[in-house]
Every structure is written in C-alpha cells, then in structure tokens.
Amino acid sequence: RLALYSKTPGLVDARGAVLKAGKFENLAIADPKTAPYGVAAIETLRKLGLYDALQPKLVQGTSITQAYQFVQTGAAELGFVALSQVVAEKGGSRWIVPAADHTPIDQQAVLLKTGADDPAAKAFLAFLKSPAAKAVIRRYGYEVR
C-alpha cells in the first residue's frame, strides 16, 4: 500500500488534504521510471488533479527507501512512501492512499527452477499462501489478494 507520510504530527490528515493546500516545500516520491511506488504516487497526484501544480515540489529518490529517507531526514516535509515503512512508526502523520487511486503495486513470491525440488522452498511458498502468513503480511502494510 501507498501512504502519504510526514514526521510532523498533524501535517497529513486522513484524506491527504495537505496536498491540495500545497503549503510545503518538498514532496518525496520514488523514481517512477524504476519504482512501482513512484508510478503509484504520480497516478494518485493525477487522479487528485494536483500533479501539474505539485510537480515543481517533487523530489525523486532512486527507490521507495530513498523517498522515505528524504522524509525521515527532513529533506522533504512529506512523501509518498510504502505503508510497510511507516506502519509501526510512532508519531508523525499519514494518509493511506485508497487503492483505487492508483494501479495495484504487486509484490510476488515465486519458486525458481533451482528450488523446485527443495522441500523447504516448497513449504515456504505454501506457508506464504496460508491464513497465518496472510495475517502477518497485512499487519505489515501489504494488501493480500
């Protein structure tokens, strides 16, 4: 899941209205050329009709990790980050972007040919599909389909 996050308590409300107000200097995103979270951030801004107005304030990290670091270090007041990066973060403020506002961000597990005969690899893949594993995955900010 994608989240709009700030270290500043109260800056980001439950609907992301801070984006419309535009009273911030920098908005961190991951590079949309290489990072699915960056694509989702741009799609969200376009859906909100804010991309053109906020484009000059965008600072791009090479990855979602760097976009998060920009917010953590104060280089950007807020940023689109992975919910998994801030799900356990104390303080700050966040808006979990509705999944309908962007293309799904797919994360997958696959069994490679080299592990096809490995019982542990097969068991781990089976575990990832279990209700227990899905509960853990959801708890850490990921969507399970």
Image (cartoon, helix red, strand yellow):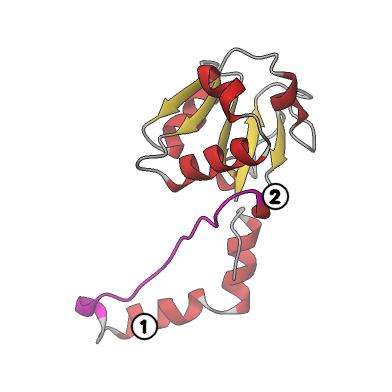
Q: Is residue 11 left or right of residue 89?
A: right
Looking at the image, the residue that sits furthest to the left is 114
Q: CA distance from mark 2 to mark 1?
A: 34 Å
**Residue that label 1 marks:** 122
Q: Position of residue 12 (x, y in %)?
A: 74, 28
Check the image and report above or below for 22 versus 105: above
Classify the position of the C terminus by image quarter. Answer: bottom right
| Percent of width and height locating residue 120 | 34, 80
Residue at image position (57%, 35%) is: 80
Numbered disc 1: secondary structure: helix
Under mark 2, the amino acid is Pro
- Mark 1: give few (<14), some (14-19) or many (20+) Cα within 10 Å: some
Viewer-proximal residue, 124 or 100? 100
Q: First in sequence, mark 2 or 1: give its number.
A: 2
In terms of secondary structure, what is the magenta stretch mainly? loop
Q: Nearer the viewer, residue 73 or 108?
A: 108
- Check residue 24 in the rendering and tell me which mark sits there, or answer none: none
Q: Residues within 10 Å of mark 2 (few under 14, many from 20)?
A: few
For badge 1, the amino acid type reads Lys
Quarter of the figure with residue 21: top right
* Mark 2: secondary structure: loop
Relative image position of residue 14 (x, y in whole percent): 80, 38
Tell me where the magenta segment starts and ends, as one range. 101-115
Q: Which mark is residue 98?
A: 2
